[in-house]
Image: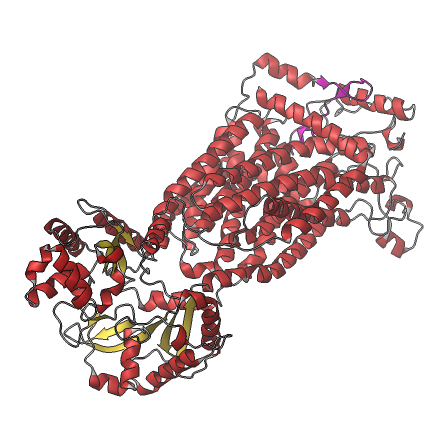
Amino acid sequence: MIAKWIDAAFGRVFYNLGKTVARWPAPFILLPLLASALLGYFGLSTIVINDTYTFVPDDGQALPDGKALVAAGFSPPGDAVAELIVQSKDGGDVLFRDDVVQEVLRLHQELTTANTTSGETFSSLCFRDPATTDCVLSGVLRLMVTAGSGSALRTATNLSYPYYNPNRVDFNLGTYLGNELGGVELSTDKSTILSSKALHLVYNVNVTTLGQWIDTFRRVCSGFESDKITVNYLTVRSTDDEMATLPSRISVYIGVAVGLLILFSVLSCLMLDWVLTKPWLAVIGVLSAVLAIVSSIGVVLLAGESFSSLNETIPFLLLGIGVDDMFVMIAAWRKCDVRLPVQERTGRAMSDAGVSITITSITDCLAFAAGIWNVFPSVRLFCIYASVGVAFDFLYQITFFAAFMSLTGRRERANRHCLTCCPVLPKSQARDKSAAYRLCCAGGVSKQEGVFDNPSSEEFNKDPLLNRLLYNNLVPFILKPSSKVIIFILYAAYLGVAIWGCFQIRMGLEYQNVVADDSHVRGYYDAEETHFKTFGRKVDIFVTEPKEYWTLDVQQAVLDKLKAFDQSQYFYDTSETAEVWLRDFLRFLNQTGNSHAATNKTVFLHILISQFLPTVGRQYYGSVIFADNNTGIASSRFFVIPKDVTTSERGKLMMTEARSIAEREPLKMKAYSFDFFLSDQVVTILPSTLQTVGIAVAIMFVVCFLLIPHCVATFLITFALVSIDVGLVGYMTFWGINLDIVSIVSILMCIGFSVDFFAHITYAYVTSKATVPAEKLTEAMRAVGMPILQSSLSTILGMLVLAFFPAYIFRAFFKTIFLVMVFGAAHGLVILPILLTTLRPCGQGQDERDTVKKISKTTAFSNGGFPRPSYPRPHSVSPYIPGKTSAINGTKPTTSLPNLRPKVGQDNPYFTPEMREGIKWVGRQRTGIDNPVVVSDYP
């Protein structure tokens, strides 16, 4: 089977690599440090946060439609240089109360009189009405300025909603107040305004002075103090500026995460022995992950890729992955016999752990690689950085960390203290020393037979408590028939709730969720969502090609589109809300006795230009673009008003309907609104997620099929993988997380991390030499159960600080990773092990299986042509199961570790023939005696 061949080949490669690293550790330490320094200096110095359109899908229609609208000469509706929403602090009316109106007018006065850095004011920079040359202001603000107070405004006007038309002109709807007044209370006639809880005011200036005015606008709004009103403001640069502040804020959290992981790693590596404990190696493991972060980000930046704000979560991810690999390496090191030479021990540890971390690194890289083809640029960027980061982490683990691990091995063989590196006595030989020495210094391995700290003693080979709980308690429990029934019921409940949650999922990344919670941008969008969804932003229906609007066919086509909008549940009646220059102009012609001009090009254009637009049709100046010399109409547009767009799903349906109507023949037009950027996300997110996840799962299946030496185990891994994905999507719904860009990245990480867990436990199970499923599972759990738990805890700790970061993107990232780790560990330690016990040997006959039980194959040894035995991996030794006697000599084993006793000629039931020959060969080559304890590490 190809998986077995790959496994053997990788084992040989890592065995030789481990010996090489242990023999010459210096270059493997210095080169990663040098590479990280250079890549960090030249790469990170160029980092610039660029989120321009990174959250917009490539196949989204809003972006090209918006560009086409601007290219035609139109200003998109709802796109303002600066805007603000005013609310009363007591939640009451802001329209007719004198004290509130006075504060609004005071704010307006400060905004229009404040000087920019060049000494200009709003009055000299504003857009002006072509007819009156006055600054263009919001309609309700003009009414306030004219009235001077709230009571005067109520007395002087009888405001109607959503259009205010005091002159009752039939061919003009009047001033649109639907997007200027929010939380409106109407009278019994459903048109007269009684109160309004929010005002939306817009301030536009010329593009040439944009930057100076925005800075002035922000300074005035942020510094405005009032005990009557609250002001939430937004500019065209606000979102980008606010997102650019996140890196400086997140850097503190990265430092805290590194500290937590160092603390956790050190505590996980501590032992009650001052020689065998490895606190500094734990620190090096975290440092290795930090170097991988710096190197990967630097090399991708040097390759010319941009950096999105979503990528700021990558350091937390790579820290968790790096620490996970460290635990696997240390676990493999501890399982090797302490009396082996450092080079040999490093080679065996690398042979054992190298295959595991290779599988997990490949699966993580490929899982993220599946996202490189995603339609969202931010997801692609994240996956590129994450893939490269995982690759660097793997490279530094097998070089930088392995080199330090071999140095730690040299310290242990010399019986030196873990902190001071001074030689100390083993505890069994320090009985005549002081209590302080025995407590704080003594430790290590004793060469005296029969003492507790000799490697042949039962106490020395005892596994950590947590590991013993897993394979001595958890395994027997989950294999009981009654336990399986309980677990099945709990799993069915888990899956049922998850599936129900999948049908409740909300889609799309909302505008306020891309910035920090304390940002003024979030305050603005929250206020907008609360008060301005009944009448949404105007939707532009436009055409950029010249059309003959003086022909009956075109006129009828426009009227047919208006009729279609009237029949839609997502739009208000166009006769009451839509701003359509052609319809109002035809009414104007009929009422002024010029109906004949409707089909005469010359007269049509003359009256339109000279009579309609300068007077009653002034609001349509920006809706008609004339050809050169006014010989025709190059492009035009009209507006429709969406109805009750209170959810992202309804916004998606509204957008789809608007585009469908606009593109109908015979007059093909386009539909555009600023809100369509969000709706495009909602349309694209589900198929994009399914496609990306499908690719990732397929890749994982192929990788596991190639690397896991069992034909059926791959299908069990795939089943567990799908189960976790369903659980993640379902339960994140109940935790307030939408299916958005963050979720796509999290699902990809879910696939990668889950395969890590499943590959560890499955590989250990199917490669076990035991024949009874319970024994195979016990061995597998002993080998990888504790690393799986440590991996889950370290990843959660690495992400924990994000739970307290004041931004939705980062909190959602923590929540999804937390769910992934919990579900992944539960499947990897409970669900999948139960399924694995149903497996039978795959692709082997009985004779071949009997042969495998008797003898292991030997492989070529590169050092002098001597044969190197294929030592069973530490988890391949059958552990002791209570109540069951050993098949050899009928004796109960006292430990699951090989009892490598150093005495020549003494038989050990756990030695394979290859192990005996190997020990003798090592002894002959190095010392001339068969005792590996006294073998030197140096020639």
User: Is 397 on the left or on the right of 833, as rendered?
Assistant: right
Residue 513 position, x and y percent, is: 44, 59
* Residue 269 visible in rendering: no
User: Is 750 on the left or on the right of 70, as rendered?
Assistant: right
Whether 929 is among the magenta residues is: no
Report the front residue among 453 and 233: 233
Q: Main secondary structure of the magenta part?
A: loop
User: Is 867 on the left or on the right of 745, as rendered?
Assistant: right
Magenta residues, start to end: 858-887
Q: Residue at x 36, y 49 (%)?
A: 64
* Residue 545 visible in rendering: yes
Residue 103 position, x and y percent, is: 38, 84
Q: Could you say which quadrant of the image residue 203 lies in?
A: bottom left
Q: Could you say which quadrant of the image residue 170 lies in?
A: bottom left
Report the front residue among 79 and 778: 79
Residue 92 position, x and y percent, is: 32, 79
Asked if 858 appears above or below 78 in the picture, the reply is above
Report the front residue among 211 and 264: 211
Q: Could you say which quadrant of the image residue 562 lies in?
A: bottom left
